[in-house]
Image (cartoon, rainbow, N blue to C red):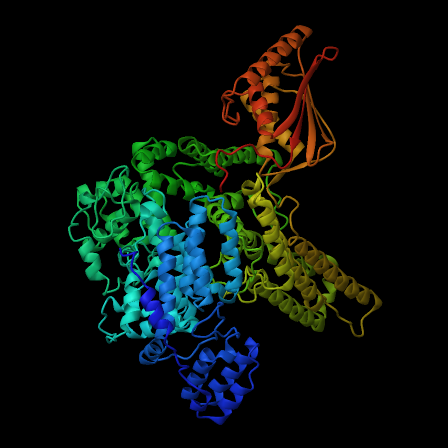
């Protein structure tokens, strides 16, 4: 590295030159084009863009190309947001700019050699400081770059690199943060949000790299900014067309970016790009700029098994360095989301083959704890490789072997799951299916099928996985799934985690040989979560297990679900949310919280057009709403299928009306053929209307059901207001101590608010159909007064029936009162009483409870359940089994707090005195003992007063007090419960 290289002579030499404007207005042949250019308001982006669009539409391609170049080079337009070849702020650009030829762009590079030399020198200075972690000096050099009109994608990469260091090193340097924010504002970074967000998200060490790559790869090839983002992931173009389009995309931002991109690609001497000599001064400075190395031990503080993953993500930030470029080409070829027909770039293959040239079999891969780790730039090294490099090596070998493994390699494949990462997302599913088909033992089959379901999820692949788990469980673990998980965890914690994730109630309830009833699936799920929380020391899984057990008990108290109105099972939705969305949402929200952006645009219709945190948040929330509506097991769709489409709606609407003519009193009027014909015609139209409602309208809107009334989109102004408010509430709630655990309750509540817009639309349509098709009328001719009265009565009864039925059916589309996962506090109390009764023979107390209702949400009620269980369990154990328990709830003077009191009857005064003495002893020892017990007593274990004191210490309850009433033989307990508390996490980061 030559950091001492003296650039002053070159600076002096280049400063003496002048770069000509490459085109003048007289070079533009068409008078119309010249006049349009002269009429532009140079301060107006809209005026400039409109004039250029008119020239493009009405003049020749050459005139349009020259006009655009004139705007981008003439000082008169230097303040327009269209942007110039050199800028002091981020350009907005124009949609679908002209595609210049390679020679035309190279000509401009030659024309502006002086400026490019100066900017490359600034870039050298910036990178030199960055490589030493001299961030303030680097930002000062960035100011020089801006002053010399060097605002570029390169500068955006630098800003992202410094921001990442600020977060990675947990710096508290306010000056640095202020300088970053000031720089962003000065260069109008919001002018080109897509590029800045693509740079930020791809390099952000807290986001899912594979998810961001997938979204970028799915962008249209006609989207020029998307081509830039794709070049961050896949630096080498496959062909000349992609190269030229990408070069033009960079050129549309700045000439400096086009120069850097061209120089990078030129290193590979691609056969479709003709060689071209760049000015020797510029080449010399560029070579020095590229020679600056970024030492991972310095920029990451230390190198461990995850560092290479971070390094790969950031390679494109300093891609001019050869090591970084090659590392990205090698590992980016394998550590990337798998898509069908994926091909490794042929121009990367020689580099890849040299890197892995000594690799022949899986036993050459690293299969041990990764203590000594390095970034291996030149060769794969199984002694120092990281998880990422090991993963690339595994996919390389599987590709080479086309998924065929010998018996020893099959064993190693399972073991390697703990020393690789994201194999299910990056490995071709065909190879995994071959491994599963060839597997001789259950363990390999389970591992392979788990990986298959990650990337190729279908009913068939899930069925195969369930069948294998079930067979393995029965044959080796006496049908005990928990024992299978314990065994799996010893072999591969990664596979165990995946099974925990996919094993929701629906999955478990279809293991027919392991779970007899749905309640068995719920209990098994709770056992699995609690065990996994214990083994990983992750309190959040234990919390989920506790909440699930309480919900099971509460559902026993509630009885069966009232199926008379539309319904979404809140418990199942919450499980789905926790399994699929919590980690994703918390990552997005964490990034939003640390991004320092005071605002971001909420566009609920622009899916896939950005890679920002705001766009990711919108996509995640839309996924929640889609699941809420479309899930066929617990969503709106399940209700529509069960109640609406499977005969109930049609039967309710038609059956009684069809039976009415059979009644004795109406036989006489059916002798009138005209009346009978009219009624038959009306009935036919009525039945057709009902059939149309059922088949087309009472559906979730989709391509197959375009007239469906319930949509999963934010497609009305009212829904937009609700969705925006949801985001506001999430951002307000999330930073709080209880934020994460309360997210599913908040989201399900807003899902109901959204769907209520469609339910109201549904009820309006039913009312319209009732008015247009549900009214029968007939005026008899030449009939006796008696028959006229009978005709009239029949008509009235038909219309009364249709009115009743449509009123009833409309009521089915009301939100249920128990839509959110919550429970009345007295219902919670009764659930605890019931559970203690199940455990304590002879416990049949008389219950005296208050009259007021207080609702506790599902994110916090297990804390109260813990406290009540302690008291009631001890009442059953030490008190009078058939005595009285008094329970009351009152508002507290403290904000958002309630005061609970529970009194339990004992047998005699001696019992009172003995219990009082024991309780005081417990409390005193609890005050002295710092090792508070974690068990919530939902699963039998230690508990009692220590548990209550622990809850008090955490802040979940407060003002705990107890006293005796010797006259009435009562022990009385009181405490305040804080409605927004949930105890303490060791690590509350998600």
Name which quarter of the figure residue 122 lies in: bottom left
> Residue 162, how many percent across, how many down?
43, 53
> Residue 21, how many percent across, how many down?
42, 81
Q: Looking at the image, which residue sits at the far top?
A: 910
Q: Which residue is drawn at the image coordinates 34% and 46% (left, top)?
A: 298
Taking 3 as reference, is 776 above or below it?
below
Is any part of residue 3 visible from this angle?
yes
Given residues 191 and 439, the one toward you in this image is 191
In the visual, does 978 lie left or right of 264?
right
Q: Looking at the image, which residue sits at the far right?
A: 785
Question: Disc count in the image?
Answer: 0
Is any part of residue 247 visible from this angle?
no
Taking 114 as reference, is 545 above or below it?
above
In the visual, does 545 lie left or right of 461?
right
Name which quarter of the figure residue 115 lies in: bottom left
> Residue 160, how many percent across, how many down?
43, 56
Given residues 417 and 200, the one toward you in this image is 200
> Residue 666, how many percent across, how many down?
73, 61
In the visual, does 748 lie left or right of 794?
left
Quarter of the figure with the N terminus = bottom left
Given residues 563 and 14, the one toward you in this image is 14
């Amino acid at each position: 590295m030559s950091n001492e290289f003296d650039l002053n002579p070159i600076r002096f030499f280049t400063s003496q030159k002048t770069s000509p404007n490459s085109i003048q207005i007289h070079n533009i042949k068409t008078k119309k084009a010249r006049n349009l250019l002269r009429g532009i308001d140079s301060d107006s982006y809209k005026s400039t863009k409109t004039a250029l669009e008119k020239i493009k539409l009405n003049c020749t391609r050459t005139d349009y190309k020259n006009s655009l170049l004139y705007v981008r080079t003439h000082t008169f337009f230097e303040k327009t947001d269209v942007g110039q070849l050199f800028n002091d702020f981020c350009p907005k650009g124009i949609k679908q700019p002209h595609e210049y030829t390679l020679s035309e762009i190279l000509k401009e590079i030659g024309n502006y050699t002086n400026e490019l030399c100066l900017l490359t020198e600034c870039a050298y200075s910036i990178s030199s400081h960055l490589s030493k972690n001299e961030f303030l000096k680097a930002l000062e050099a960035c100011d020089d770059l801006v002053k010399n009109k060097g605002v570029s994608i390169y500068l955006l990469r630098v800003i992202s690199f410094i921001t990442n260091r600020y977060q990675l090193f947990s710096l508290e340097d306010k000056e640095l943060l202020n300088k970053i924010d000031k720089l962003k504002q000065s260069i109008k970074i919001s002018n080109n949000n897509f590029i800045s967000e693509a740079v930020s998200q791809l390099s952000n060490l807290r986001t899912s790299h594979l998810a961001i790559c997938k979204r970028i790869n799915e962008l249209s090839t006609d989207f020029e900014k998307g081509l830039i983002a794709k070049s961050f992931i896949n630096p080498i173009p496959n062909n000349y067309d992609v190269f030229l389009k990408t070069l033009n995309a960079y050129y549309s931002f700045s000439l400096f970016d086009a120069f850097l991109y061209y120089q990078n690609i030129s290193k590979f001497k691609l056969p479709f790009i003709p060689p071209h000599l760049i000015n020797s001064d510029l080449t010399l400075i560029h070579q020095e700029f590229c020679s600056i190395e970024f030492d991972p031990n310095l920029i990451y503080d230390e190198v461990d098994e995850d560092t290479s993953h971070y390094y790969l993500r950031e390679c494109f930030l300093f891609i001019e360095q050869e090591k970084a470029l090659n590392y990205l080409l090698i590992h980016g070829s394998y550590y990337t989301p798998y898509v069908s027909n994926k091909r490794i770039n042929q121009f990367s293959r020689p580099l890849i083959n040299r890197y892995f040239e000594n690799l022949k079999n899986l036993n050459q891969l690293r299969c041990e704890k990764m203590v000594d780790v390095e970034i291996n730039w030149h060769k794969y090294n199984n002694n120092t490789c990281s998880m990422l490099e090991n993963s690339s090596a595994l996919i390389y070998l599987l590709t080479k072997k086309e998924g065929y493994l010998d018996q020893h390699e099959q064993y190693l494949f399972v073991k390697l799951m703990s020393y690789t990462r994201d194999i299910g997302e990056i490995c071709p599913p065909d190879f995994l299916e071959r491994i599963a088909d060839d597997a001789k033992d259950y363990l390999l089959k389970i591992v392979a099928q788990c990986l298959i379901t990650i990337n190729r999820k279908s009913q068939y692949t899930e069925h195969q996985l369930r069948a294998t788990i079930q067979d393995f469980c029965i044959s080796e673990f006496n049908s005990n799934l928990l024992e299978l998980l314990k065994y799996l965890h010893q072999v591969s914690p990664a596979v165990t985690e995946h099974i925990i994730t996919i094993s929701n109630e629906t999955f478990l309830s279809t293991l027919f040989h392991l779970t007899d009833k749905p309640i068995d699936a719920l209990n098994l799920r709770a056992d699995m979560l609690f065990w996994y929380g214990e083994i990983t020391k992750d309190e959040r899984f234990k919390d989920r297990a506790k909440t699930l057990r309480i919900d099971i008990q509460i559902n026993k108290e509630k009885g069966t679900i009232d199926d008379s109105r539309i319904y979404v099972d809140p418990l199942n939705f919450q499980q789905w949310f926790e399994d699929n969305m919590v980690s994703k949402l918390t990552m997005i929200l964490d990034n939003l919280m640390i991004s320092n952006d005071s605002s971001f645009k909420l566009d609920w219709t622009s899916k896939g057009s950005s890679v920002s945190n705001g766009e990711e948040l919108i996509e995640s929330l839309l996924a929640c709403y889609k699941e809420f509506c479309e899930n066929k097991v617990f969503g709106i769709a399940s209700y529509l299928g069960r109640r609406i489409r499977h005969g109930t709606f049609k039967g309710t609407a038609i059956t009684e009306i069809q039976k009415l003519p059979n009644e004795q009193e109406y036989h006489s009027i059916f002798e009138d053929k005209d009346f009978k014909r009219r009624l038959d015609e009306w009935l036919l139209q009525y039945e057709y209307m009902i059939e149309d409602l059922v088949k087309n309208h009472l559906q979730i809107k989709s391509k197959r059901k375009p007239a469906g009334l319930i949509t999963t989109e934010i497609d009305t102004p009212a829904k937009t207001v609700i969705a925006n408010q949801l985001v506001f509430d999430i951002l307000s709630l999330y930073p709080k101590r209880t934020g994460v655990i309360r997210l599913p309750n908040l989201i399900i509540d807003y899902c109901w608010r959204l769907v209520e817009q469609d339910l109201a639309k549904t009820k309006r349509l039913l009312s319209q159909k009732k008015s247009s098709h549900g009214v029968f009328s007939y005026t008899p001719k030449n009939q006796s007064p008696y028959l006229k009265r009978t005709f009239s009565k029949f008509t009235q009864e038909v219309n009364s029936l249709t009115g009743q039925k449509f009123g009833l059916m409309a009521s089915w589309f009301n939100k249920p009162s128990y839509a959110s996962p919550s429970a009345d506090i007295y219902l919670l109390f009764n659930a605890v009483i019931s559970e203690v009764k199940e455990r304590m023979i002879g416990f049949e107390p008389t219950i005296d409870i208050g009259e007021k209702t207080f609702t506790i949400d599902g994110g916090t009620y297990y804390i109260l359940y813990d406290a009540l269980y302690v008291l009631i369990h001890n009442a059953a154990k030490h008190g009078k089994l058939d005595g009285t328990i008094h329970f009351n709830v009152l508002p507290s003077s403290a904000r958002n707090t309630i005061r609970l009191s529970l009194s339990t009857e004992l047998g005699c005064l001696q019992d009172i005195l003995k219990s009082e003495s024991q309780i005081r002893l417990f409390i005193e020892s609890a005050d002295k003992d710092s090792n508070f017990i974690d068990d919530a007593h939902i699963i039998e274990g230690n508990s009692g007063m220590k548990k209550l004191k622990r809850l008090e210490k955490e802040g979940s309850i407060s003002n705990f007090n107890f006293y005796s009433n010797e006259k009435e033989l009562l022990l009385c307990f009181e405490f305040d419960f804080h409605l927004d508390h949930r105890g303490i996490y060791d690590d509350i980061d998600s």
